[in-house]
Amino acid sequence: MPTPHLHRQWRAFLRVAASLPLLVGMLASGPAIGQVATQTAPKAVAAGGGTPPPAASTSVTLANLAQAEAWVPRTATQVRRFFENGNVVAVREELIVAANGAPDPEFSLRFLAVEGEPSGSSSWSTWAQNYARYAGLYHRHGSFRIRDLQRATANYTLHDLGPSQRAGRSARRVVVFPVRLDKSVWLLDVDSVTCVVLYAAEYDVQLRLLGEVEALTFTPAANVTTPFVPVMGITAVPSVDAARRSMPGAMLVEPSLQDVAEYALGKAQVVDNPLNGRRSLVLAYTDGVDEFFVVQSPGSSDWFAGLPSQSKAGGGAPRTMARTRDAQMTSLLFWQGGTGFRVDGRGSLRRLDDFAKQVYRQAILGG
Amino acid sequence: MTLPEGLDPPERLDPTAPDHPPSAACRAHLTDALEHGVGRGDHGLSCSYCSARLAAAERLVAALKQPVAVPAELSGAAGSAAVWERIHSQLESGALGRLLAAGMPVVAPPSVAASTPRPQLPAGLLASATLAPPLPSSGQWAAVAARLRDDRHQHRSLVRRSRVVGLALAGTAAAAFLGLFLVSRESRDEPWIVLVDTMTQPGSSSVAGEFSPFSVVRRGH
């Protein structure tokens, strides 16, 4: 006799399975689902007039998307929408990428405007500062990208929904669907000629819009006059062991991935934070498309030092891990041995709880 | 009962004393004279009553100062016993003695022979019961000895078997205890992690300035 827990799992599975045709139908029917969902997104109309360009002969595949990302130089004016607590902030930006086949080509991402805000307002200044500091993160981690083609092929399927138009160019509308349902579903408009992503909307399995980047203009050419230079000192390291060598004396953990086996270490960086003068090890794990981060900050003060449970140090006393979760993201924070740990990922990826607990155990047992 | 020698009854102390009741002055004079030794004025010289009383008091004091000699019959234990015996005889012969004799008659206890029941056993059984049992034969003794040897042998084998079983049980218990100890030690070493849900989303700048790339990507700051 099935248990209530199994009943719930089956019901959740059937609900998701039933929602898939609906999702595909919705994505295929509208010109831009993001406009319907947010009601604030500007209408993406082909700049070239009413006549759509001819459909491209190039089929859209995950491999083509990865290849275009690496090889196609491009200049685009686009709108990036941030969602927080039910509010949407749409920021207009200019992206120039001098792609040449290198894994991390030169680029610039420049703040242009906050939609609906007058020039010179406080919001305008805030977002200008945010772009000066975090443009690299917006570009590299802020939207859809094939980060590991082999893993992306294993963990996602691509469904072509037909022709579309975006930024005055002929495009193909595709859905990139995860094999496991605790990740995001991506709706893409892909340039028919270059296979560059012109529009990317991120949904969870409950069809909630989580993020959106929409190209308004697109040119397959680039001239990067002022490449982005991060404010923070970022040093890429090949592994956690290399980070240990560059951060002597720091208690660092190489996380075990048994709970998120389809993910692998994508990037390891030692970041010097000018705000607090502290060095952190930032590990980015990817399944090919999705990412989550593990940040280890040696020298942090114990965030939970004042809690009654932490006063009973030693065996048997509970260890506290703070968790904040909503549809957008999951944050798990804990502290051990002078190092603050932070595990951040998407809100639907609930396996991060077990993953973070495992990292905590590793930290307690000395890495 | 007789008074000591030289001591007369009070009414005969002074036959000439007036037979009139004492006045208040007599009482006050006698109180002062007898208790404090000083009389009041000349009342003692003029009052015959008071002078008689005071003279009697002087004689009585002198008599009381002489120790009373105990009679020789009462000084020994035999004399006291004789006195008590005489008192007892007088009481028994008196009305009280007769009353007690009538109310509490002396009953003699029954004799032992009369209270013992007569034997009810048949004569044959009584004879066999009183006879000494016959001694066992040598064959019976040999059988008893063989039985004792068998019992001893069985006891030894039982002890040996119980030792083996005991050792096995002790080994099993030790192994179980060791296993439980190791399991409990392992579980004790396993950290107990408690997840606490917080309402506010910690951003890159809200938690001690910690850097969170994902929060930046999601929320822009």
Image (cartoon, coloured by chain):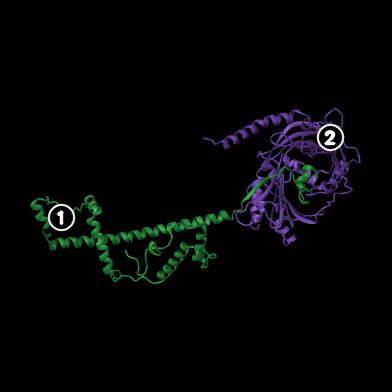
Chain colours: A purple, B green
Residue A270 vs A40, above or below: the answer is below
Q: Residue at x 41, y 64 (%)?
A: B14
The residue where tag 2 is placed is A167
Element assignment for label 1? loop
| Residue A297 visible within the image | yes
Residue A353, horizontal then vertical, whole percent: 66, 46
Residue B149, horizontal then vertical, whole percent: 23, 62
Q: Residue at x 40, y 65 (%)?
A: B13
Three-letter amino acid code at the position of disc 2: Ala
Residue A309 vs B37, above or below: the answer is above
Element assignment for label 2? loop
Q: Specify whether disc 2 shares its chain with disc 1.
A: no
Image-quadrant location for residue A27? top right
Task: Give the numbered dot on residue B151.
Answer: none
Residue A30, horizontal then vertical, whole percent: 76, 28
| Residue lying farthest to the right in this orientation | A120
Left or right of residue B8: residue B32:
right
Around disc 2, counting alpha carbons within 10 Å, would you say few (fewer than 14), some (14 to 19), or many (20 or more)?
A: many
Residue A107, horizontal then vertical, whole percent: 84, 47
- In terms of depth relative to the viewer, which is nearer, A275 or B130? B130
| Residue A70 visible within the image | no
Around disc 1, counting alpha carbons within 10 Å, would you say few (fewer than 14), some (14 to 19), or many (20 or more)?
A: few
The residue where tag 1 is placed is B111
- The residues tagged by marks 2 and 1 sit, at their Cα atoms, a distance apart of 143 Å
